[in-house]
Amino acid sequence: MSAKTRILIVMGTRPEVIKLAPVVIAARDRPDEFDTFVVTTGQHREMLQQMLAVFQVAVDFDLDIMKPGQDLPYITTAALNGLHEVIAQVKPDWVVVQGDTTTTLAGALAAFYQQVPVAHVEAGLRTYDKRHPFPEEMNRRVTTQIADAHFAPTTLARERLLREGISDDAIRTTGNTGIDALFLILGSSEGEAAPKQAGERRLLVTAHRRENQGEPMRQICRALLRLVDQFSDLRVIYPVHLSPAVRGTVFPLLGDHPRIELLEPLEYRGFVEEMGRAHLILTDSGGIQEEAPSLGKPVLVMRETTERPEGVEAGTARLIGTNEERIYSEAAALLSDDDAYKKMARARNPYGDGRASEKILAALSGRPGERC
Ligand code: UD1
Ligand code: UDP
């Protein structure tokens, strides 16, 4: 083979590290084929470091942009300016971005401005509602317009890209690299997860989306209080995102109930263990909607729309919005009706086979433009 491929992998937030770590690990295992560079914008700080440590990903450049209460123009411009410098220095053959965060958008744009090809991991997710989730739906649509290689996690994502006019040869259906990450962690687990207390049912909760901050988040909290009051065997486990907009609502409302545990963000292995121990998961997260079906855990999605209908179609996920009454009644129904619960609690895996990173690297190997 001719010269090695230089890839610059861009990450900024917790889920980007989780979903790109398997790609970095696989690329660094092939030093004869790839020169691999990692840049973090530092859109997240503590939550990013936590995940880099789990996967032992060494970072070549850290822009360290995070500040409390950062707004979207700040993240976009700080990341764009910093990434511009790094791309100019590294001169990669490919810039690899993942998902739909502001770091993703800035990475794609910075590469485009220097006419470096962009590879988009987890391409083709859509709600077709540009304000839900905000700003992620627009971030991924713009990234699609810029990208040269589109790694679709599912056939549905691929079909959406084709419908939008992306050429067939520029798309590979790979599965989601998040499932690679999950399998990496499950494969390296050192035995059984800590047992839960006899007779207890654990309800694992996460919520952080910008469009859910404020009143929707208060409704979520009130529904949780009603659920623990109604079901005396229920324990809520809620690792709270570090965003002040989230914590400012969650701690005052839920902070002193004896069966609601508000935790700091868990490192990935600990979180996967908690998913394993959970009876039911309530979340507005994207990644957790993909992981829960693999683990056979029913997940109620506290959002108005989802770009991941595969889990809903497979029967493991249900989209329930953020209205207090609806969250309470949907969760209470599953906690009361064993048959309904069992129907949802079957392991299915619509999001991949754990080999997505391998397929992505196969497509990126060699000179850009020859494939994808
Ligand atoms: C971001 C992404 C969202 C993704 C989520 C994953 C955008 C616009 N949003 O949302 O798509 O689903 O990450 O979690 O790209 N903070 C810390 N330490 C951290 C991380 C965050 O203190 O390690 C606090 C900071 O005060 C920061 C705030 O959280 O200003 C919000 O972070 P930000 O990245 O702007 O938004 P997220 O809601 O985390
Ligand atoms: N996660 C974690 N610890 C936590 C909460 C979530 O490791 O305390 C993991 C979770 O398993 C998933 C990812 O973080 O892989 C989801 O991140 P987040 O909800 O922040 O972002 P989203 O998926 O909504 O973009």
Image (tube, rainbow, N blue to C red):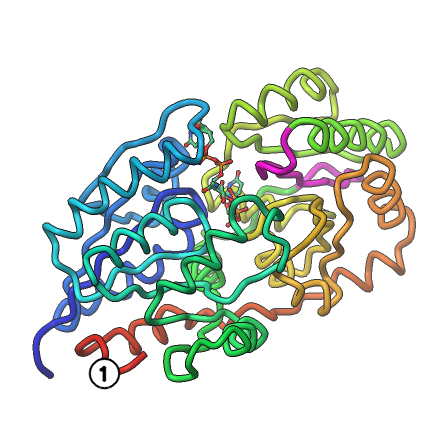
Q: Is residue 239 left or right of residue 115?
A: right
Q: Amino acid at mark 1?
A: Glu
Res 116 → quadrant: bottom left
Judge whether 196 appears above or below 88 on screen.
above
Position of residue 195 measured from the top left corner of the image (x, y, whole percent): 64, 42
Q: Residue at x 27, y 55 (%)?
A: 9
Percent across and percent down for residue 310 are: 65, 67
Magenta residues span 196-213
Side of 145 where 344 appears, left or right: right
Name which residue lies at 60% across and 19% down: 248
Taking depth in this image into account, of 72 and 235 the one nearest to the observer is 72
Secondary element at image label 1? loop
| Total marks placed | 1
The answer to which image quadrant residue 45 occupies is: top left
Q: Is residue 325 magenta?
A: no
Q: Which residue is mark 1?
A: 370
Which quadrant of the figure has residue 343?
bottom right
Residue nearer the viewer, 123 or 187: 123
Is residue 198 highlighted in magenta? yes
Q: Residue at horizontal 30%, vertical 77%?
A: 363
Where does residue 298 sit, x and y in percent of width and height? 73, 55
Q: Local crowd at mark 1 within 10 Å, few (<14), some, or many (≥20)?
A: few
Q: Residue at x 40, y 35 (%)?
A: 73
- State the image coordinates of residue 275 (x, y, percent, origin top left): 61, 48
